[in-house]
Image (tube, rainbow, N blue to C red):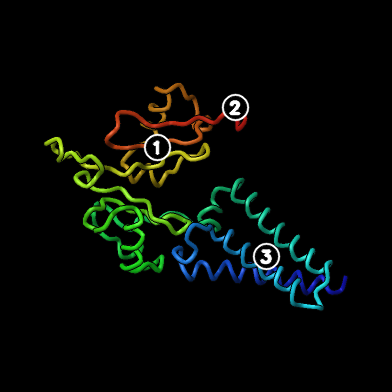
Amino acid sequence: MENLMPILIETLFGFFALFALTKVLGKTQIIQLTAFDFIAALVLGELVGNAIFDDQAGITEIAFAVIVAGIILYVTEIITQKYKGSRSLLEGKPSIVIYKGKLIKEEMKKNKLDINQLQHLLRAKDAFSISEVEYAILETDGTVSVMKKPVHQTTTKQDFNIAPKPVRLPTTLINDGEVLWDNLRESDLSEKWLEQELIKQNFNSVKEVFYAEWNEGKDELFVLPFTEKET
């Protein structure tokens, strides 16, 4: 038992040190993995390596370390599910790196993303020129979501001699039954307007709404209710 405390301390230290490292390296270093998936893979890989090559590491010690790592990951998932405010810190949040055709250099710098990396990610989405892109969002797993300009979209308006309409980025207004006030204000919308839109779709309370999205080009709010199992 006396050997378990050092293992506990080292596992906790290693876990949070790796988490800090993923924040320093930026999202593109862990493509298609969340920060905690990346950490779990490294920690568990190291534990298996110790089990194979370290004669001093017994089954009890390795099992204890694995359990500690598992508990940390499990608790982290519970925290992000129950406390929405922790999600941006623990899971990160998407960053808009191209907005209305313009590069947002501050966001690129903050996410350790250079122009060559961005071009590579855009090419993976069939956008071979930055000039084709209206919006690009760097997701939390390091991938990029792309909305092309109307004239570069598949089956373009140009093909039918139709004047292209401006594209607008949808804005999330409600998530998990909670209003995202910053997004509401940035869209120049009011709480009263939101309440009226929900009433139109037979919702009496924000708590009944799982997700709501506003697009300036649409006639009404897009709303998804909680399912019966989730209410």
**In the shown orientation, is residue 165 left or right of residue 32?**
left
State whether residue 68 is above or below residue 7.
above
In the image, which disc is placed on residue 213?
1
Q: Which structural element holds mark 1?
A: strand
Where's the N terminus, which quadrant? bottom right
Distance of mark 1 from mark 2, alpha carbons? 21 Å
Q: Residue furthest front?
A: 52
**In the shown orientation, is residue 186 left or right of residue 231?**
left
In the image, which disc is placed on residue 33?
none
Where's residue 46, x and y in %? 67, 71
- The mark nearer the N terminus, 1 or 2, is 1
Mark 3 neighbour density, 10 Å: few (under 14) some (14–19) many (20 or more): some
Mark 2 — residue? 228
- The mark nearer the N terminus, 2 or 3, is 3
Where's residue 29, x and y in %? 47, 66
Where's residue 131, x and y in %? 21, 56
Q: Amino acid at mark 1?
A: Glu
Residue at 82% over, 70% down: 4
Q: Amino acid at mark 3?
A: Leu
Mark 3 — residue? 44
Mark 1 neighbour density, 10 Å: few (under 14) some (14–19) many (20 or more): some
Residue at 59% over, 50% down: 80
- The mark nearer the N terminus, 3 or 1, is 3
Where's the C terminus, which quadrant? top right
Q: Which structural element holds mark 2?
A: loop
Distance of mark 3 from mark 1, alpha carbons? 39 Å
Q: Nearer the viewer, mark 2 or mark 3?
A: 3
Residue at 46% over, 40% down: 179
The image quadrant of residue 10 is bottom right
